[in-house]
């Protein structure tokens, strides 16, 4: 029996190593003053990926890194074997937490203008681990979902869920309260539900009431919370930035037009966010990009421009309404493409670093 258990454990570990996942680590810091921290995080992650490839073999790389100053948010996008991804993502998250907690008090989050900050729940706000291929069943331990005391005994049934739990446990060890979602949670609870029911995400940053006195701010416990999970599918992100001609009310009509729960595009979640200089963005999560793609959003956008009464009343052309529509982060195809280009990963690292420095005006 002991031998059999050991063989199952070995086989499960082998599957985790071979099964490819993508991982996005979102950090609540993206302004140029955080450049030193963010560049150092990327440099360490790239060197760790290279060391893992050289020492243990397998796939792991930083596909993309991005910093958005108006949202004061940055992201690191990994791809590779589930075990390597869990290792590197855990390092990014714990080091980001340590660096930002020790950042000079006068420059910390709660002293910033929150009017265009991206909603957030903590310094390392969100980590998503997503499949890059067909899910592989692992040997998971199911629990009685009514017994919350045993929730930490839960072992996910797939590699992406396992990686998310592993990353979450690394943050729990340094005192962070982690809310799991997707296949990293026994009930498979969606991210939006966790954010709405367990955190102040939808009442933070730019979504916080502009009429709320600062002393009554609903700002999160900056260091203490993170949402970490594993969606069923690879989730893409796509934003539409409107010009200052568009009011929040006009922006909200576009949000409702694209959002599935309001009769829009299947698999699309959307939120109206203040961006900067009186502008708004419609930020979209594409939960099923195979059926609710960025192309589908672009087509609906054209329909909205031609049929929405509030837009037509502005008597403007498309360029006067839409400043830009752009993809945020990566796609599954992009991740697989980078991983397959093994002979140019060093060159790719330089490109990723150069783009991050440009984002930060470094």
Image (cartoon, rainbow, N blue to C red):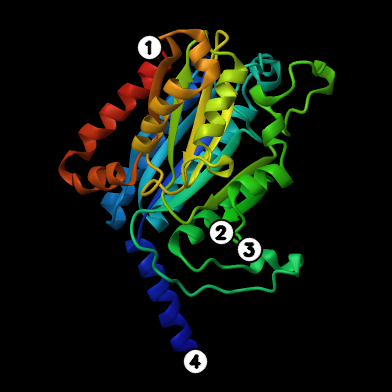
How many marks overall? 4
Q: Nearer the viewer, mark 1 or mark 2?
A: 1
Q: Earlier in the sequence, mark 4 or mark 2?
A: 4
- Is residue 288 placed above or below 241 in the rendered structure? below
Disc assigned to residue 184 = 2
Badge 4: residue crowd in 10 Å (few <14, some 14–19, many ≥20):
few
Q: Are dots 3 and 4 in contact, CB under 8 Å?
A: no
Real-space Cα distance between discs 3 and 1?
Answer: 45 Å
SS of the residue under disc 1: helix
The residue shown at (18%, 38%) is 344
Q: Nearer the viewer, mark 3 or mark 1?
A: 1
Residue 27 visible (yes or no):
no
The residue shown at (37%, 68%) is 15
- Residue 230 coordinates in the image, percent (x, y): 51, 54
Judged from this view, the residue extending furthest toward the left is 343
Real-space Cα distance between discs 1 and 4?
Answer: 68 Å
- Residue 307 coordinates in the image, percent (x, y): 46, 24
Q: In the rendered image, which quarter is residue 117 located in?
A: top right
- Residue 277 coordinates in the image, percent (x, y): 55, 8
Real-space Cα distance between discs 1 and 2?
Answer: 42 Å
Disc assigned to residue 319 = 1
The residue shown at (67%, 41%) is 225
Badge 1: residue crowd in 10 Å (few <14, some 14–19, many ≥20):
few
> Could you tell whether 76 is left or right of 116 in the image?
left
Q: Are dots 3 and 1 in contact, CB under 8 Å?
A: no
Q: Nearer the viewer, mark 4 or mark 2?
A: 2
Q: Which residue is mark 4?
A: 1
Real-space Cα distance between discs 3 and 4?
Answer: 31 Å
Q: Which residue is mark 3?
A: 187
Judged from this view, the residue extending furthest toward the bottom is 1
- Is residue 351 placed above or below 84 in the rendered structure? above
């Amino acid at each position: 029996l002991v031998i059999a258990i050991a063989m199952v454990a070995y086989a499960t570990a082998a599957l985790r190593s071979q099964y490819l996942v993508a991982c996005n680590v979102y950090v609540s810091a993206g302004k140029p003053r955080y450049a030193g921290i963010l560049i150092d995080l990327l440099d360490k992650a790239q060197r760790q990926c290279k060391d893992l490839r050289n020492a243990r073999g397998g796939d792991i790389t930083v596909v993309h890194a991005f910093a958005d100053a108006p949202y004061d948010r940055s992201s690191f996008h990994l791809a590779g074997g589930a075990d390597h991804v869990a290792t590197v993502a855990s390092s990014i998250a714990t080091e980001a937490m340590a660096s930002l907690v020790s950042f000079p008090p006068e420059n910390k989050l709660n002293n910033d203008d929150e009017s265009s900050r991206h909603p957030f729940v903590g310094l390392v706000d969100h980590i998503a681990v997503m499949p890059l291929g067909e899910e592989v069943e692992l040997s998971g331990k199911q629990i009685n979902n009514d017994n919350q005391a045993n929730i930490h005994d839960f072992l996910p049934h797939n590699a992406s869920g396992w990686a998310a739990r592993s990353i979450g446990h690394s943050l729990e060890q340094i005192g962070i309260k982690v809310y799991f979602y997707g296949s990293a949670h026994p009930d498979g609870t969606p991210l939006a539900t966790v954010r709405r029911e367990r955190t102040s995400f939808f009442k933070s940053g730019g979504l916080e009431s502009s009429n709320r006195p600062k002393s009554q701010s609903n700002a999160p416990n900056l260091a203490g919370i993170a949402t970490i999970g594993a969606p069923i599918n690879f989730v893409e992100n796509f934003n539409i930035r409107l010009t200052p001609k568009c009011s929040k009310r006009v922006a909200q009509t576009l949000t409702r037009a694209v959002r599935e729960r309001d009769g829009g595009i299947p698999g699309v979640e959307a939120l109206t966010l203040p961006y900067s200089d009186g502008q708004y963005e419609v930020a979209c999560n594409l939960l099923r990009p195979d059926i609710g793609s960025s192309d589908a959003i672009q087509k609906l956008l054209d329909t909205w421009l031609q049929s929405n009464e509030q837009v037509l009343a502005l008597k403007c052309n498309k360029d006067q309404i839409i400043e830009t529509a752009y993809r945020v982060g990566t796609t599954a195809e992009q991740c697989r493409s980078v991983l397959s280009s093994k002979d140019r990963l060093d060159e790719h690292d330089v490109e990723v670093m150069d783009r991050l420095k440009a984002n930060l005006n470094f």
